[in-house]
Image (cartoon, helix red, strand yellow):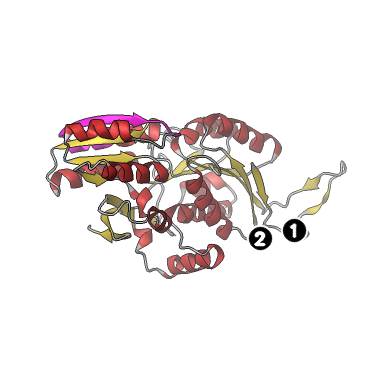
């Protein structure tokens, strides 16, 4: 599915060349966005899109492509964007998509800003590729340390989505935890996890750490409770989303999670963004929407320098909705994470 959002009136399009083609003005920023707008990760993609829409102004055009979280789709879509749409920069989300799009961006010398990509090596040695997200060591490592040092856990079971995102989190948790760990994988399309959970129940572990997309995590915790699995549940900040917590209707209460500051930040720009989002969509945004907004605004900020790649490389102390950003030599940005617990449908910060 392709959705074209044109955020510039015809008045800013200059006339036609001798062949009759439309010529784009130099200050128009055209961004190609590859998002999972359908499929199991559609919630993540749709929230990014909603945030990006709020970032569009009269100098920005965004062309949306639906990857459905499928790397093969993403390859074709990026090639189409570069070949036929004359994009200035691109945004892509999710680790499996990032892994195939990053080499293409480097090959075509198109600045690519990745977000919601936990694999922290995808931008390495690629000067046209940037990543604005936490990494698996930061996120899963925080959970493992909390389980070990604050919950006194010595055994753990990990249920993870069987892709690079899930594996990187599973590996990072295992490394930091240091205790006995048993892992079980599942496919992106899975909705029934009772087989893995019955095996986990037999192990009688101290904690169950779940990594996947929102529907996976909610279903795992709900089914585990139905099976009366006696353990401490843990996951990442996917569950911090107010919309997911509302839809889960208490199913994920008592789950320990990580959380970014966005959910508790009282800065004026964050509060105004949340109000604008609520007025348009009828619910408060999650951090994915904020990341989508930030991605567009950072590309626009870099575009003003006349060289998007150089502009991104020079970002330092940039105040985004997710917090203060700076770019390191590998093109990586990150924001702080805290530890929290879901209590009565709300996120209660613990650190």
Q: Residue at x 14, y 42 (%)?
A: 153
Q: Residue at x 53, y 50 (%)?
A: 46
Q: Nearer the viewer, residue 47 or 106?
A: 47
Contact, mark 1 vs mark 2 (Cβ under 8 Å): yes
Task: Please give the range of residues in magenta.
Answer: 170-189
Please indicate whether residue 198 sits to the left or right of residue 74 in the image. left
Q: Is residue 24 above or below residue 192?
A: below
Give how far across and how far down residue 241 sits, in percent: 39, 55
Give how far across and how far down residue 52 sits, in percent: 55, 54
Q: Nearer the viewer, residue 284 or 309?
A: 284
Residue 314 visible in image:
yes
Taking the magenta stretch, the answer to whether it contains residue 182 is yes
Q: Residue at x 47, y 47 (%)?
A: 44
Residue 170 visible in image:
no
Give how far across and how far down residue 159 sits, in percent: 30, 35
Residue carrying label 1: 12
Q: Is residue 19 above or below residue 72?
A: below
Q: Quadrant of residue 90?
A: top right
Secondary element under disc 2, as helix, strand or loop, is loop
Secondary element under disc 1, as helix, strand or loop, is helix
Residue carrying label 2: 58
Q: Characterize the local packing of mark 1: few (<14), some (14-19) or many (20 or more) Cα atoms within 10 angstroms.
A: some
Please indicate whether residue 49 sits to the left or right of residue 191 in the image. right
* Cα–Cα gap, marks 1 and 2: 9 Å
Earlier residue among tags 1 and 2: 1
Q: What quarter of the picture does the C terminus occupy?
A: bottom left
Taking the magenta stretch, the answer to whether it contains residue 1 is no
Give how far across and how far down residue 272 sits, in percent: 48, 69
């Amino acid at each position: 599915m392709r959705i074209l959002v044109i955020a510039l009136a015809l008045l800013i399009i200059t006339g036609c060349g001798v062949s009759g083609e439309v010529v784009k003005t130099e200050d128009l920023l055209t961004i190609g966005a590859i998002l999972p707008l359908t499929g199991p990760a559609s919630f993540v993609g749709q929230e990014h899109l909603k945030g990006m829409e709020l970032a569009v102004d009269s100098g920005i055009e965004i062309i949306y492509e639906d990857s459905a979280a499928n790397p093969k789709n993403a390859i074709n879509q990026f090639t189409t964007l570069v070949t036929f749409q004359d994009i200035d920069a691109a945004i892509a989300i999710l680790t499996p998509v990032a892994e195939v799009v990053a080499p293409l961006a480097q090959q075509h010398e198109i600045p690519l800003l990745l977000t919601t990509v936990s694999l922290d090596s995808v931008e390495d040695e690629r000067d046209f590729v940037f990543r604005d997200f936490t990494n698996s060591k930061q996120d899963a490592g925080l959970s493992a340390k909390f389980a070990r040092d604050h919950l006194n856990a010595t055994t753990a079971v990990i249920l993870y989505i069987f892709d690079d995102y899930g594996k990187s989190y599973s590996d990072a948790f295992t490394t930091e935890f240091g205790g006995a760990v048993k892992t079980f994988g599942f496919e992106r399309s899975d909705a029934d996890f009772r087989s893995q959970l019955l095996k986990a129940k037999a192990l009688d572990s101290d904690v169950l750490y779940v990594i996947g997309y929102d529907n996976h995590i909610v279903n795992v915790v709900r089914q585990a409770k139905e099976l009366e699995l006696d353990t401490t549940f843990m996951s990442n900040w996917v569950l911090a989303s107010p919309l997911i917590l509302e839809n889960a209707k208490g199913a994920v209460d008592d789950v320990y999670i990580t959380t970014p500051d966005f959910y508790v930040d009282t800065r004026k720009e964050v509060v105004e963004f949340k109000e604008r989002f609520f007025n348009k969509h009828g619910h408060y945004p999650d951090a994915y929407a904020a990341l989508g907004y930030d991605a567009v605004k950072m590309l626009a900020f870099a575009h003003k320098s006349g060289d998007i790649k150089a502009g991104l490389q020079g970002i330092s102390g940039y105040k985004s909705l997710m917090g203060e950003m700076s770019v390191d030599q590998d093109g990586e940005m990150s924001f702080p994470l805290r530890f929290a617990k879901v209590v009565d449908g709300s996120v209660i910060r613990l650190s």
